[in-house]
């Protein structure tokens, strides 16, 4: 399971959560380059997510970071594409189950690749997991959801519903996850001044590994005089995981974005 440290509250992120309830009104560069399909279908959405993910990776990976990412991608491929004796794949089934919802979801200027996260986390199962820990579509813990409920800009449905209800309902859990992801993105893009593509890839990693861990590794790079971009971050994460092969959290972190990428590719290949 991809869990562990993503669930600890990060105090510095919380500081920036108030007053920044929406992303910039300016249309993001990735949205200008790849506009959202006007007539969605299983095929169009799968193709769009794959193209968008490729856009992000092509702009954020180079050199050793790209090589490390490719190695991990090869390592996780079988985990994502595995089929049972009936020929069924959990992530393909999750995509089909989710489609009636995701084709209508308001992404609020967030890239559609974030919708791959609940496929990896829960295989789009609203009651997956333990209500006292990781639970629901997006596998959030109650402490995070309860904190999100206190935000002034949280939707009324989030404020009025219990943590269990929020996590087990597709609409509410997605709104909660968007609040959570938006705060991470605000920090990486607007405070730390990473590029759009770097900021979103760091945000997705932080969803799994925790923003504090991501920020500390970026700070380590800067302390060594290494440019703190996503590619160098990923290379450092890869080296750290190889040096600590028994660390489950590090393994989950280094495999997280490559696993999402494989899901995107498989959906595109299938549909």
Image (cartoon, rainbow, N blue to C red):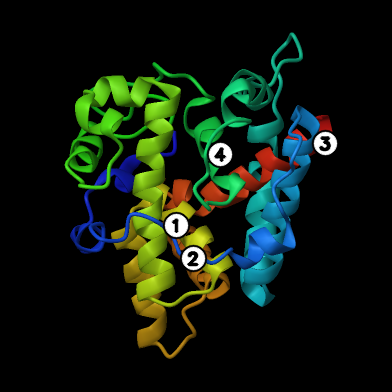
Q: Nearer the viewer, residue 22 or 8?
A: 22
Quote the CA–CA distance across marks 1 and 2.
6 Å
Q: Are marks 1 and 2 in contact (CB under 8 Å)?
A: yes
Q: Relative to residue 106, is residue 63 depicted above or below?
A: below
Q: Which mark is residue 115?
A: 4
Sequence-wise, the earlier of marks 3 and 1 is: 1
Separation of disc 1 and disc 4 at Cα?
A: 13 Å
**Label 2 to label 4: alpha-carbon separation:** 16 Å
Image point (21%, 64%), residue name: 12
Residue extending farthest top: 86
Does residue 249 appear in the picture of this structure?
no
**Which residue is tagged 1?**
203
Q: Is residue 259 left or right of residue 193?
A: right
Which residue is the site of mark 3? 269
Residue in the foreground of this view, choosing between 213 and 60: 60
Instruction: State the residue in front, 95 or 81.
Output: 95
Q: Residue furthest bottom?
A: 225
Q: Quadrant of residue 7?
A: top left
């Amino acid at each position: 399971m991809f869990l562990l440290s993503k669930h600890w509250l990060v105090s510095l992120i919380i500081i920036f959560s108030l007053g920044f309830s929406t992303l910039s009104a300016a249309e993001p560069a990735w949205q200008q380059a790849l506009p959202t399909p006007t007539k969605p279908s299983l095929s169009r959405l799968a193709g769009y997510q794959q193209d968008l993910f490729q856009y992000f990776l092509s702009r954020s990976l180079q050199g050793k970071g790209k090589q490390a990412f490719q190695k991990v991608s090869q390592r996780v491929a079988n985990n994502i594409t595995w089929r049972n004796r009936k020929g069924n794949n959990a992530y393909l089934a999750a995509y089909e189950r989710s489609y009636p919802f995701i084709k209508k979801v308001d992404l609020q200027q967030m890239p559609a690749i974030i919708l791959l996260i609940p496929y990896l986390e829960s295989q789009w199962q609203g009651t997956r997991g333990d209500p006292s820990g990781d639970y629901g579509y997006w596998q959030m813990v109650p402490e995070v959801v309860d904190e999100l409920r206190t935000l002034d800009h949280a939707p009324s449905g989030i404020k009025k519903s219990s943590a269990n209800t929020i996590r087990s309902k597709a609409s509410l859990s997605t709104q909660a996850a968007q609040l959570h992801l938006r705060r991470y993105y605000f920090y990486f893009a607007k405070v730390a001044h990473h590029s759009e593509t770097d900021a979103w890839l760091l945000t997705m990693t932080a969803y799994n590994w925790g923003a504090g861990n991501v920020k500390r590794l970026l700070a380590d790079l800067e302390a060594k005089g290494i440019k703190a971009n996503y590619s160098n971050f990923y290379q450092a994460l890869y080296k750290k995981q190889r040096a600590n092969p028994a660390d489950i959290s590090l393994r989950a972190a280094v495999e997280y974005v490559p696993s999402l990428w494989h899901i995107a590719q498989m959906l595109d290949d299938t549909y």
